[in-house]
Image (tube, helix red, strand yellow):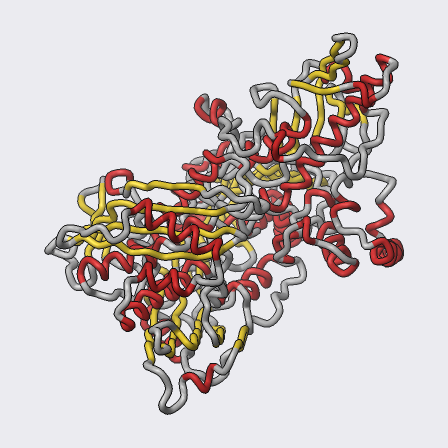
Amino acid sequence: MARLLSRRAALLGGAALGGTVLAAAAAGTGYLAFVDMDGPDPHIDGDRAVLNAFVALQEDGRVVIQAPRTEMGQGIHTGLAMLVAEELDIPFDGRIRVEHPVEQLPVYANAGAPLRTRPEAMRGPLMWAASRALSALPLMNTAGSTSTMGLWVTMRRAGAAARHMLVAAAAARLGVPAGALTTAEGFVCHPATGRSIAYGALARDATAFTPPPDPALRPASAWRLIGRSQPRLDLPAKVRGEPVFGADVVLPGLLHAAIRQAPVFGAAVARLRNAAAVRARPGILDLAVIDGRGVAVVATSWWAAETAAAQLDIAWTETAADRASSATLAAALQAALGDEGAHEHLREGAVEAAFGPGAAPLVEASYTVPFVAHACMEPMNATVLIREDGTAEAWCSSQSPLTMRWGVNRGAGWAGVEPASVACHVTMTGGAFGRRGELDVVAQAAFLAARHRGRPVKLMWSREEDIGRGVFRSHAAARLRAALGPDGLPAAYDALVAAQAVQQSAASRTLPFGQGGSPVGDRFTVEGLEKAYYAFPARRVRSRHVPSHLPVGVWRSNGYSFNTFFTESFIDECALAAGQDPLTYRRALLRASPRHRAVLDRVAAMAGWGRPMAPGRGRGIALEAAYESVVAQVAEVTVAADGEVRLDHVFCAADVGTVVNPDAVAAQMEGGILFGATTAMMSALTLDAGAVVESNFHDFPLQRLANAPGVTVEILPSGLPPGGAGEPGVVPVAAAIANAIHAATGRRLRALPLAVTETIGTRRTRSLLPGHAA
């Protein structure tokens, strides 16, 4: 195991922290100069020469890269490895191996996500102190489309520092100045004599040298890899079926578990009526109530556990939510759209005056979206081992080893066990979307493992548990108003959204101290609502927290996923009221935002905007800036006479800053579009008697290949640092589809999903406009 860095360990102490903040203030030094290379001192670990927290070399020339972000299919391990390989100067081939680190070092923390700041912009003592505090947790997580932007500089510096150490080792061995040496393709070269030494042969010697704190990075003109599509490092192994996902974990003595949880959130187990009969089933080893809220069955196989769990006869306690329904929750949202009690996030200009008596023509509209589930392809699962000596290990498809560790401690605590240590192994992940940042399944598995000390327990939820008892994206409603000026453009814009606060709900479940703070003014609730790039002379953004008994959490693109549907539908309505073309209207609003306008113009050209379409066909456009990226999309739809909607094609133009791996960015946009189209056209959870009605993919369908649209993506060149790519593609698609349906039919749909989904047999679905369902 790597040794923690000693020369900077004191920085994590309170007294030293205060002193170094003062030093940073005096020197004007930024965050990166202090912590980029925090981690293990260079050392030998078995057959590896560990040069820093991110790079280790083996004598056979193989390079092991620690990538502290979860690989969930987005290709981040390839992208981060490219950054290291660029500066280390090695071929991008099979000699590179990428691992998710087990040891949670401060340098791996994703401090930029909660601070909403790029790491390279973290300047000054206050930002440094906040970053250092988050790193001390350490907050290693994969969220907010921050993986590349958060490690863009760090991974390059790690590669450059390792190269510097290898050159120093070669200089010492050859007896020449380091400045006389060059590197190429994994070799240190001495051009004057033609001699060269492979990195592997220098690896052990290099550990004797100190990593430079601020190594020089290659200029963009010298890049060999960055900006050029590279093959995914994980694909060959996936084709062979070799990677281990959480569901694949197999350990000696493994026990399997299944669970049943209350259909109404907040209910508890009142009585288990048939415990004896279930215990008597073949292969059943244990039956346990977990935290009073669920019943788990432990068996010799998952199928034995799951079939036994299906037979459980559980009486649940009554709750105040037993009479809640989709109708009552929707009514609460609508009631919250009044002006009284709203939290004001933003006010610019004289908003009230613009909407007063005798004001300009008014456009007003209300929109709604339902609760939705994450529906990851890999069901929720975790494997936990708690040994007799109190040490624990966990294996999980997780977005954060920190929440894994908290989950193990919490679940073991339910059983009266306090782990002496917890090692967290983040496996490959079959989809996440925010859901795998939760600790529920890990805590449940740890509770069961504490009851079976010395044997690992794998708990896997069924699809029904995942859909009906999971964590959801909040439902939401919005009321938007615009006062139009003489040119037809909004002179004032007023937005009010009502939703359940995400941060308070998620933090109250996840944080060890169980407090989420006030739900009022939740920033996720208003993401995408302010439309700062549109030239509105006056604007106001407000929100209302509307609680429910359902747990809500982060979901792929969070508030953008509904607010952009609201706002970009509304911009089309304003254009219609002004008698203007939606593209022309947006271009006028973007007169002070050239970056956004360039993206909009590009997607319009891609789609042939303005070209006539056949009757029943329509084209819609939408734009959003999210996660430091700008994405515009045009959707083309065909609506049949019976109301069947076919999404024919989605064109997407994106400016995501500097692109590391263009193929991966395009794939993320494509996947985001299909994910967003699923939510726009199909996804909705309904409630009856307090419980979620939907249970599996037959009534919570996903986009299928049989009716998937064509997708065309273009990435615009940019000199900006990298932005996010995992979530921005999701954001504009619902509004683009809604606007296209209006263009095709004249019907303005202000609620998601935009269609009623009807399953045809078991292989495909079709979507029908409301009022046309068979």
Q: Taking 340 as reference, is 771 left or right?
A: left
Residue 456 placement (x, y as % from top left):
59, 36
Residue 641 placement (x, y as % from top left):
10, 55
Residue at x-position 65% and y-position 46%? 140
Q: Taking 573 as reference, is 19 left or right?
A: right
Compared to residue 18, the image places residue 91 above or below, namely above
Q: Give the residue furthest to the bottom.
A: 357
Residue 605 placement (x, y as % from top left):
33, 47
Is residue 450 in view? no
Residue at x-position 40% and y-position 84%? 355
User: Depth check: 450 or 542 in front?
Assistant: 542
Residue at x-position 78% and y-position 19%? 181
Q: Taking 707 as reference, is 323 left or right?
A: right
User: Depth check: 671 or 257 in front?
Assistant: 671
User: Depth check: 424 or 650 in front?
Assistant: 650
Residue at x-position 37% and y-position 65%? 566
Q: Give the residue furthest to the left.
A: 641
Q: Taking 548 as reference, is 3 left or right?
A: right
Residue 570 placement (x, y as % from top left):
34, 68
For the C terminus, the quadrant is bottom left
Compared to residue 465, the image places residue 187 above or below, namely above
Q: Quadrant of residue 508?
A: bottom right
For the N terminus, the quadrant is top right
Compared to residue 302, the image places residue 699 above or below, namely below
Is residue 144 in view? yes
Compared to residue 471, the image places residue 64 above or below, namely above
Q: How many marks?
A: 0
